[in-house]
Amino acid sequence: MENKYNNLKVITNPIVNQSLCTLRSKNTDTQGVRLAARKLTRILLYEATKNLPQTDITVETPLTNFVTQTINPSITIIISPILRAGLIFTDEAVDILPQATIRHIGMYRDEKTLKPVWYYNKVPMPVDKPEDYYVYITDPMLATGNSLIEAIRLYVDKGIPESNICCVCMISSPQGIENVFRNFPNIKLIVAAVDSHLNERGYIVPGMGDAGDRIYNT
């Protein structure tokens, strides 16, 4: 797929490709899927967090004092996994950004309408200075994009700028990408792969099957 979106970044390197092969193979067991997903998660999150603002800080090393940069401590960082498959991102995200707040979003897809159905929402919090909030919404599969759109809307409705919202997905479809950017053209989207298409059931092809089932052995 030709990348016609300025805010879409497809991360490709040998480690990403190897991890995707492991995820996709029907012969990979649950433990193998989890390990590959965590490895991929870390790579994607490193890329996603490049937008975090930094500030100068003086550090004392064993040899001297010097001025360097670190993540601005005055901002609020939110990791927002879409349950249940998005949970695979959480452990890696907390390791990388221990100062982040985790805000879970619970949705499942109605298999007939392909529309998201809410069952859990930990986002209803007050937002002071929304321009200082940086949100990372995580979901392994971007299929129709309907669930991601609902999740983005939760934060946009609180006044958080679209440009401060980054969605992180492992495998995506062209239809889902188009749907998300049609609704929110200024969010950022980080993915590891853009697959061929969606089938009649709304599953990504070639994809990896149901990510939640494969990650949690259900």
Image (cartoon, rainbow, N blue to C red):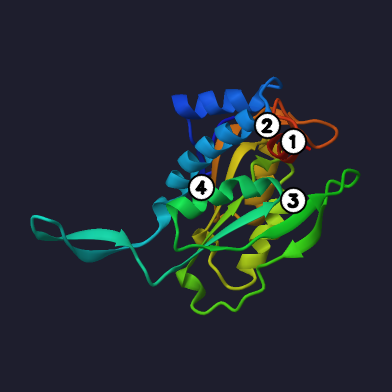
Q: Tell me the SS state at disc 2.
A: helix
Instruction: Nearest to the eye among marks 1 and 4: give it.
Output: 1
Residue 131 picture location, percent across and down: 47, 71
| Mark 4 or mark 3, earlier in chain | 4
**Going 59% across and 23% down the picture, which residue do you hit?**
21
Q: Earlier in the sequence, mark 2 or mark 1?
A: 2
Residues tagged 2 and 1 counted as in contact (Cβ below 8 A): yes
Q: Which one is in front in this view, the residue at disc 4 or the one at disc 3?
A: 4
Q: CA distance from mark 3 to mark 2?
A: 27 Å
| Label 3: element kind | helix
Q: Are marks 4 and 3 in contact (CB under 8 Å)?
A: no
Residue 92 is marked as 4
Indicate the quadrant where residue 62 lies: bottom left
N-term mark: 3 or 2: 2
Q: Amino acid at mark 1?
A: Asn
Q: Secondary structure at mark 1?
A: loop
Q: Residues within 10 Å of mark 2 (few under 14, many from 20)?
A: some
The one nearer the camera, 213 or 124, is 213
Residue receiving disc 2: 30
